[in-house]
Image (cartoon, rainbow, N blue to C red):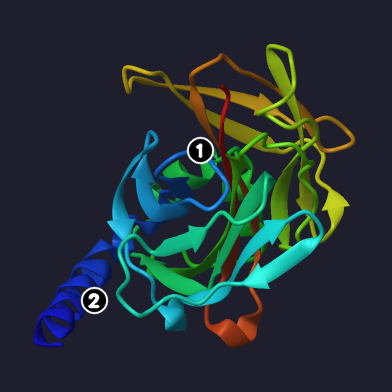
Amino acid sequence: MKNHLACLLVFAFSFRLAEPALSHEFWIEPQNYQVESGEELPAQLLNGQEFKGFRLPYFKTRTKRSEVITGDTATPYEGRMGDLPALTVTAERDGLLTLVHETMPETLTYETWEKFDAFAEHKGFADIRARHEGRGLPVDGFTERYSRHAKSLIAVGSGAGSDRESGLETEFVALENPYTFKGDTLPVQLFYQQKPRAAAQVEIFERAPDDSVSITLTQTDTEGRADIPVKPGHTYLLDAVVLRPSDPETGAIWETLWAALTFAVP
């Protein structure tokens, strides 16, 4: 008990120290993307850059929603505070399994305009200065509110099945099963408030078997679709950000919603 409490205190302290870095990507990374029925499936919650991140423990107070989806069944997931890996489930049924994790909103204060501007431009919002000035907002000392909306696709046994909308406010849906399809491009669709999100930047992180990572950009079409080039033996993280004015009652002036999808290609 004492050791567990000590670990929790260390996790909480390191988690707090890491908060300024939370403007970077957040994703679910299972220990294995392909498992057999009945196997235990540990998965990390990671936060970082270039598909490399530090591990985050499970905290109920920071979790808005966590689920395991198999077929048409969504089962709520609740871990123990401080669990690391954050998620551990049993892959009970053959087919495509989806892990879903949504965080509670957090806030981040920008002391200077330059940092926010660089972040916004990197995520595809080149018009951010005009939008900011058009609202008459301060250029320093302002707050952003952000939340994470992550999914991960895992093959259990045959891996057969289809991805679908899970009801996250923003999310990717794979239009083909990455574990069973034959091809070199995987079609995906990006949603925001259950509607296709057109003309949105998608950042593609591709990890090769030697752990090298390449990063490319694409954009969704008028139906929110994008074709993702894929290679056998590689793993992928897709990231897209919604940037919108925040509800004044939150104390923040901007709000970001981060959609993430991870999967592997056999």
Q: How many marks?
A: 2
Residue in the foreground of this view, choosing between 88 and 256: 88
Q: 12 or 6: nearer the eye?
A: 6
Looking at the image, the residue that sits furthest to the front is 38
* Distance CA(mark 1)–CA(mark 2): 28 Å
Q: Nearer the viewer, mark 1 or mark 2?
A: 1
Q: Amino acid at mark 2?
A: Ala
Res 88 label: none
Q: Earlier in the sequence, mark 1 or mark 2?
A: 2
- Give the residue drawn at x 52%, y 31%: 236
How packed mark 1 is, by other alpha carbons closer than 10 Å (few <14, some 14-19, many 20 or more), is many
Quadrant for the C terminus, please: top right
Residue at left 19%, top 67%? 14
Is residue 149 shown left or right of residue 196?
A: left
Query: Residue 80 location in percent, x, y?
Result: 38, 79
Taking the image as shown, residue 225 lies to the left or right of residue 51, namely right
Residue 139 makes an appearance in the image: no
For the residue marked with disc 1, what is the amino acid? Tyr
The structure residue drawn at horizontal position 80% and vertical position 34%, both measured from the top left corner, is 175
State whether residue 254 is above or below residue 80: above
Name the residue carrying label 2.
12
Instruction: Using residue 152 as the reference point, say whether residue 18 is left or right of it.
Output: left
Q: Which residue is mark 1?
A: 33
Quadrant of the image containing the N terminus: bottom left
**Residue 107 image position (x, y, % from top left):** 44, 72
Residue under the point 39% across and 77% down: 59
Q: Position of residue 60 (x, y in %)?
A: 45, 81
User: In which image quadrant can residue 133 be found?
Assistant: bottom right
